[in-house]
């Protein structure tokens, strides 16, 4: 009986560890944002994913560009909301930003503007049916900025852009 109880407890743990993935998507004029998470994130069932795309001439875009020291290709605000109250995840979530209509695949430098300042993330690029995507993991929601990576580690190639400043060591 003790062995049977131990086996049953082990089976329950295994089932809990394989938590079902949940996905929500939201679309703007130029982007599709898909967030994938498990029950560990504790996002309520009635939470709705909302995405704001900031235009390059908006005050928010200008402020973030100044903070970054360069102009990102895009700036989005991503979050889950329940009755207009933002809900933060209790565990990291996977985020995929699809840039509609783009065809050139590259990796992306992603910056998350969190409560503790800027957090640099690597966005893995992939071709999609309707564009190109960058996928990365976030521990909380707020503004995120992205641009094509200028350094390709697989070929050890640095693509330099006129107007950018580089410190070579």
Image (cartoon, grey):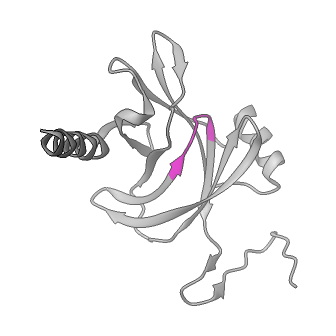
Q: Is residue 10 above or below residue 115?
A: below
Q: Residue 113: x and y, percent? A: 70, 41
Kindly indicate the quadrant of the structure image that contains residue 163: bottom right
Kindly indicate the quadrant of the structure image that contains residue 129: bottom left
Residue 169 vs residue 7, the one in the foreground: 7
- Left of 88 or right of it: where is 125? left
Q: Residue 20: x and y, percent? A: 26, 40
Give the residue at x 73% y 74%: 161
Residue projecting furthest to the bottom: 155
Image quarter in which the C terminus is found: bottom right
Give the residue at x 79% y 39%: 63
Residue 6 vs residue 102, the one in the foreground: 6
Residue 157 vs residue 119, the one in the foreground: 119
Give the residue at x 32% y 21%: 45
Q: Which residues are magenta?
A: 137-143
Residue projecting furthest to the front: 1
- Left of 73 or right of it: where is 30? left
Q: Residue 168: x and y, percent? A: 86, 83
Q: Residue 103: x and y, percent? A: 40, 67
Kindly indicate the quadrant of the structure image that contains residue 155: bottom right
Residue 140 vs residue 151, the one in the foreground: 140
Q: Magenta span has 101?
A: no
Image quarter in which the N terminus is found: top left
Residue projecting furthest to the top: 83
């Amino acid at each position: 009986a003790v062995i049977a109880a131990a086996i049953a407890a082990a089976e329950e743990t295994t089932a809990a560890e394989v938590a079902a993935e949940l996905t929500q998507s939201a679309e703007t004029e130029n982007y599709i944002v898909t967030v994938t998470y498990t029950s560990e994130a504790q996002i309520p069932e009635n939470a709705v994913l909302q995405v704001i795309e900031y235009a390059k001439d908006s005050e928010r875009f200008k402020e973030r560009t100044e903070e970054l020291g360069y102009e990102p290709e895009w700036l989005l605000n991503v979050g889950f909301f329940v009755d207009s109250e933002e809900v933060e995840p209790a565990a990291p979530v996977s985020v995929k930003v699809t840039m509609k209509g783009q065809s050139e695949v590259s990796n992306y430098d992603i910056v998350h503007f969190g409560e503790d300042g800027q957090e640099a993330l690597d966005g893995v690029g992939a071709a999609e049916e309707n564009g190109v995507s960058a996928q990365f993991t976030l521990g909380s929601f707020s503004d995120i900025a992205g641009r094509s990576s200028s350094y390709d580690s697989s070929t050890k190639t640095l693509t330099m852009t006129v107007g950018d400043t580089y410190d070579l060591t």
